[in-house]
Amino acid sequence: MVTRPALPLLPVTDKLGPLAAALEAGNRAVLSAPPGAGKTTLVPLHLLKQAWRGDGRIIMLEPRRLAARAAASRMASLLGETVGETVGYRMRLDNRISGRTRIEVVTEGVFVRMILDDPELRGAAAVIFDEFHERSLDADLGLALALDAQSVLRPDLRLVVMSATLDVDRIASLLCEPPVIISDGRSYPVEIRHRDRPGDERVEDAVAATVLKTLAEETGSILAFLPGQAEIRRVAERLEGKIATDVMIAPLYGLLSQAEQDAAIRPARAGTRKVVLSTSIAETSITIDGVRVVIDSGLQRLPVYEPSTGITRLETARVSRASADQRAGRAGRTEPGIAIRLWHAGQTAALPAFTPPEILSSDLSGLALDMAHWGVADPGQLLLLDMPPEAALKEARQLLVGLGALDESIQLTAKGRRMRNFGLPPRLAAMVLGASEHGQGRAAAELAVLLTEQGLGGSDLDLDERLRQFRRDRGDRARNARNLAQRLAAGFADHTDDATDVPTSSAGALLIHAFPDRIARQRGGRGRFVMANGRGAEIGASERLAGAELLVIADLTGKAAQARVLAAAEITRSDIELFTPHAIQTADESGFDPASRQVRARRVTRLGAIVFDEQPLAKPKGDEAARALADGVRMVGLAALPFSKAAEQLRQRLGFLYRSLGEAWPDTSDEGLLARLDAWFVPFQSGVTRFPEVTAGSLHDGLMALVPGGSQRELDRLVPTHFTAPTGQSHPIRYDGEEPVLQIRVQELFGLKSHPTIGGGKLPLLLELTSPAHRPIQTTRDLPGFWAGSWKDVRAEMRGRYPKHPWPEEPASAQPTARAKPRGT
């Protein structure tokens, strides 16, 4: 029997026994252990000794490759072994597993593929979900699938969910209230300091200044958290030449090679210090020996997916309180430390409790494909901590139907099963399948791996250039990626895929299979494009591809109206005709042209919103032209129509009746009229083909057609157009508000003892009484009350201002007039 070295004593050590006992008695447990507790290394090693494990493997999920490698390396060293013996890891492009391996540290995406391929997880005794608080889409789905498999197929499978900052109540509820073990926190105290960053100070300036000050005042290495690679580069530039030669600057982010990442987390050499500039990648699961100061910018970069555009953009956002705690905890892993937060202490309480889970803001096409493979149509059938947004899931399924992966009933097709086997995003899996039919499977697989592995082939916007660089790269990562592409393409009989053919394959021609909706044509100048889906996209004018006539866009970011292209490749029209022969269609179209504001007819050859060729045809006539013009009204709005004053008043009268008496009368609001253009507009515009030909009379006649049959006389009785004053003069009544309004000079109502009304005497008019100069002096709904009441005050003020006009003491008995007093009176 092999004698293993004793495990180190860490805060979680006292909880290993209760955790093992919980898994002996049941099959689920939750462990909450703050940073530095030792859960990532000690829990799997302790469970290795449990009798219930037998000879089964322990699978532990990590959110990132860096964390997976670091965890496996640390556990192997505690056993006095190398990685790949008792402890190994499995991730995309890298695999250190042997027949002796009993603890497999895997990335979350790898685990999802493992369980989808083998729902029983044969040979596995336990699955540990480490750092579950990060809530990646793969972690959420992986746990849901594991719970489903455990309930139906593997009741003996043990599941452990653990994290440093876990929402314990929610996860325990999801797991049907298993034992919850809570461990003590970090081994060493961390002093929290704050440095409020003014709003006009750039984050890289604040971090660089704090690093320099800290190097002068504190000992030990520094870990600084920044939102992204660009900020890391700018901080490094600001520190260059300002720090001592015994201080090394070490960037740490996802695009770096494994060797560069390992160098960043390796302890500084004796007599030297290190400044690690990192994204959120260093928040969890890794220890950087020698770090005793953390500088936290308080920012992170999160992907936000917009289902309506299919665009994922990166937004800079405040970190959550959980992330801030995780970051601070990095300072106390090996000795007492300091965490400097670049915000006011009072702002911490306003931070969100947790980072939003990916399932709420991600492209869900991969999730939808995996659910279909699992045989689940409704996500509610899975134990997910958060349900995916309905709109995003619907959009994802529509994409999969378009790619042929799902049928109209959302069932997995034969093509969908083949696509899922690739372990690629659905669009790229469809590209590999489609390209293989043209003997280009190997080339498409290389492009797919290039697009899913950030940093391969450089950062050029032109994917043809990146593909060339990738094929020339002799580094380990590039070689492993090319080997993966070869394995992906191995199942195809691509007889034309040989060493001569593959390098000449056009990236754009391959991408047509994945992004037919993102085929783009230059429009409106260099660098400005319109895609087949109707969205616009832009490329910097200095880029070579900015001058291309046609592109396929593989990646873009930004708002829908200002999408910026991140990766694309040039194509030709013949490429489109070869690989998507039915996409380009020619048809006769007639309709409203918003540019000329008239009805046009043309023969158009188009790909979605992209017009390749067009030929004018004779304009439509009669009802067809009128209906097309109505479409134009819907596009540009009713304001484009020449409504006369009489027609506008009729709209207001009918609208007032609709608001007052209900649907017996027509709704003449903008929304109401636009909804009924076929009833009041189209029948009166026969032969009209452009807006200037629409007459005000035809609009008035159309509105009258909306009056219920036989009700025109009732219309005039209920809402007359004018009020006849005692002087005999006629004044218009306004119906544009909640009540009818009559504006009139007060002298014209002299002698009137009752308040003016409409609607058969039932509805009083709101009187806006004016002076002889038509300036307002009083508003009233009770004219007799006005004569008896406030008229005295109005008379006293007005008679001095307008002495040529009558201001009698008894207006109800006076003679009405529209004129000034005769001369000499």
Image (cartoon, helix red, strand yellow):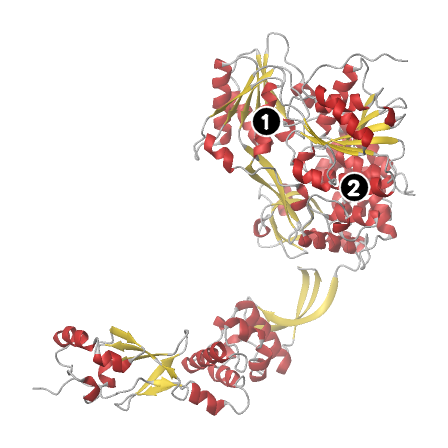
Q: Quadrant of residue 159?
A: top right
Q: Quadrant of residue 664?
A: bottom right
Q: Are marks 2 and 1 in contact (CB under 8 Å)?
A: no
- Mark 2–mark 1 Cα distance, whole angstroms, equals 32 Å
How many marks the image carries: the answer is 2
Q: Nearer the viewer, mark 2 or mark 1?
A: 1
Q: Quadrant of residue 317?
A: top right
Q: Nearer the viewer, residue 238 or 572?
A: 238
Q: Nearer the viewer, residue 94 or 180?
A: 180
Q: According to the image, label 2 marks what residue? A: 424
| x and y percentages locating residue 234 in the rendered image | 54, 28
Badge 1: few (under 14), some or many (20 or more) residues near its Cα, within 10 Å? many
Q: According to the image, label 1 marks what residue? A: 327
Query: Can residue 345 be seen at all in this image of the molecule?
Result: yes
Quadrant in the picture for the N terminus: top right
Q: Residue at x 74, y 46 (%)?
A: 508
Tell me if residue 343 comes above or below residue 508 in the rendering. Answer: above
| x and y percentages locating residue 51 in the rendered image | 87, 24
Residue found farthest to the left: 824
| x and y percentages locating residue 227 in the rendered image | 57, 32
Q: Nearer the viewer, residue 80 or 381?
A: 381
